Image: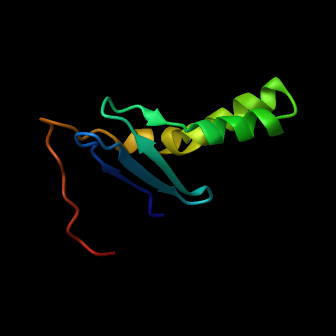
């Protein structure tokens, strides 16, 4: 099954963006700050605070806003980074 993550680096004066896809979860999109942190905006937090019916629901909502399920699933595939060797897949299945 196809899984992917695409990250646009933040530039001067602009946040970046991360889009992740995991089968069964769908697409998660979030803004990324220059330091690499996910950005949750004020309206998202206000909506969550107004609709969460318990502290557990609030915690679950924060996990959803941060894409915790996507991160957990994709972490095993995040071995490549600056200065590490990347293996390109050329064969079409």
The percent position of residue 69, horizontal first and vertical second, equals: 58, 42
Residue occupying image coordinates x 87% and y 33%: 53
Q: How many marks?
A: 0
Q: Residue furthest top?
A: 55
From the viewer's side, name the closer residue of 49 and 8: 49
Q: Is residue 68 visible?
A: no
Answer with the quarter of the image where residue 64 lies. top right
From the viewer's side, name the closer residue of 10 and 22: 10
The percent position of residue 11, horizontal first and vertical second, equals: 24, 43
Residue occupying image coordinates x 82% and y 39%: 51
Q: Is residue 83 left or right of residue 57?
A: left
Q: Is residue 63 left or right of residue 53?
A: left
Q: Residue furthest bottom?
A: 92
Q: Is residue 2 left or right of residue 26?
A: left
Q: Is residue 62 above or below residue 93?
A: above
From the viewer's side, name the closer residue of 61 and 31: 31
Residue occupying image coordinates x 53% and y 45%: 70
Q: Residue furthest front?
A: 13
The percent position of residue 82, horizontal first and vertical second, equals: 16, 36
Q: Is residue 38 visible?
A: yes
User: Which quarter of the rendered picture does the C terminus lie within?
Assistant: bottom left
The percent position of residue 49, horizontal first and vertical second, equals: 76, 32
Residue occupying image coordinates x 61% and y 55%: 25
């Amino acid at each position: 099954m196809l899984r992917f993550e695409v990250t646009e680096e933040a530039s001067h004066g602009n946040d970046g963006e991360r889009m992740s896809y995991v089968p069964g979860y769908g697409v998660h999109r979030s803004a990324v700050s220059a330091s690499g942190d996910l950005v949750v905006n004020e309206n998202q937090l206000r909506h969550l605070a107004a609709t969460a019916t318990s502290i557990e629901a609030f915690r679950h909502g924060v996990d959803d806003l941060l894409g915790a399920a996507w991160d957990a699933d994709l972490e095993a595939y995040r071995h490549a980074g600056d200065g590490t060797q990347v293996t390109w897949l050329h064969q079409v299945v």
